[in-house]
Amino acid sequence: MKTQLKGAICAAALVIVAAGCNDFLKGGDLTKDPNNPLDATPKQYFASVQSQLWTQQTGDLARLTSMWLQQVVGAARQANGTYNFTGVTESSFDGEFARAYQGGGLLDLRKIDAQVTPLGDSIFLGISKIVEAWMIGVDADIWGDIPYNQADSFFVYPQPILDPQQQVYDSVQSKLSQGIAELESGEGSGPEEVDLVYGGDPDKWIALAHTLKARFYLHTAEVIGSPAYANAVTESNLGINDNDGDYIANFSGSQAGESNPWWQFLDANGTTGRNGDIVATDSYLETYMAGIHDPRFSDYFDPGNEDTYDFSPVRENPTYPQPFVTYNENLLIRAEGLLQTSGAGAAAVPLNAERAAWATATPWHSAFTLTPLTATLANIMNEKYIVLFQNIESWNDYKRTCYPQIVPIAGGVNGVIPGRLLYPVGERQTNTNVPAVVDQPARNWNDPAPCPPVD
């Protein structure tokens, strides 16, 4: 397993390097992937896809959102400019925009589809569709209107149009449903041991897909309202139903190709040389958890530890199994949905089931006893803010609910935390469908209103 993981993440690193030198959705990595030979097997492609997904979930976007949501502090160099919004430009996240499309993303996922379909391997096809929906959905969350339907055929569409965010979300839901249907048919063997999280288990992938559907339904709730919340409840009822189904990364050592990217960035022994750029010291989350005497504090923070800048040994660990989608999140999705559709009494059941779940240790957290809470939006979302430490999803929750009620650092951008990122300059310069900076919206379709100032 260790050898597989090292190879997978090293392949992703090569892809990232290549992305910095090529246009994102035309030519370059989209039409020719130098890191995957033409005769690669579906399992080899999946290793690249898996590592790209993990990097999307633990890389620059996760650090950005954790800083903007004040779970951590950008203390030095580029991180300080990200933290106080002054250093975020259309050049800041070029590679992150491309990640869902290039080698390890849509490019390799479509190769998997083409190879496993004639073999009748519906398990592999279903997993591929779920990962595609997840990765593309993340880009839509952040950039809004993005290339998708024309993004996989450079020779037919050298300058792909931007599909409206609402349409992309519809496609994401459709792709997840397709993936579930393929998995339910149960044909083929899937990625098996190359899947370092679920081992290719169809039932676990089906549950994950339902939780992802619930998550993406919530992303439309600010505009659509009750139907979106109702759909989120329905899907969460079919989603991850215990912590054994958590989708968590499986890192195996302290080398660059096998360790948690957060540790690589944060620790003095990591591989990026960024020790001290991002710290936990005096972050809003550290102060908030200390103030409410949350017993989970010790899993997250270690105040006064100058070597780790207040990060706990649990989190600052090369093999920390970073949680991406969990049973805890699934319960809190259900709690929010029920609060909006059925009231506080119904919402209290999943909220306090989530609190009770902490009594059993999992690979990503120790065991803690938590007292029940009254089901209010503040209680549900503040609990989720703690659960989603270092997770991109925190930004989506904040944009929708305005919890936690934080004051933007240095006044934010025009008084608020931004609702989207600018399109990357490389794509704008090579695709005339990408609008100039001055013509880009401040917010995406699903998030029309900024959070009001906090008194």
Image (tube, rainbow, N blue to C red):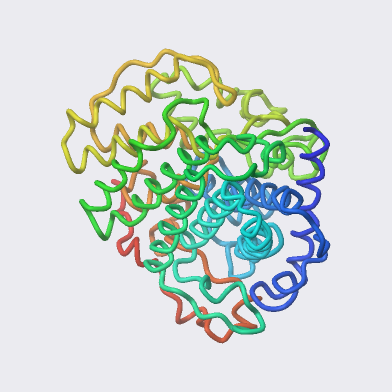
Q: Is residue 123 above or below residue 363?
A: below
> What residue appears at the point 40 percent right and 49 percent down from the top-left corner?
213
Image location (x, y in percent) of residue 430: 64, 83
Q: Considering depth in this image, is 156 or 439 the residue closer to the camera? A: 156
The image quadrant of residue 170 is bottom left
| In this rendering, position of residue 170 left or right of residue 248 | left
Is 389 displayed left or right of 294 in the figure?
right
Answer yes or no: is residue 92 visible: no
In the foreground, 234 or 302 = 234
Where is residue 95 shown, x and y percent of the image? 67, 63
Q: Is residue 172 visible?
A: yes
Given the current orientation, which residue lies at the most extreme bottom position? 432
- For this view, does 255 lie left or right of residue 367? right
In the picture, measured across the screen, residue 136 lies left or right of residue 114, that is: left
Q: Nearer the viewer, residue 141 or 325?
A: 325
Determine whether 437 is above or below 325 in the image: below
Residue at x 44%, y 46% (from the top left corner):
212
Residue appearing at x 39%, y 69% in the figure:
167
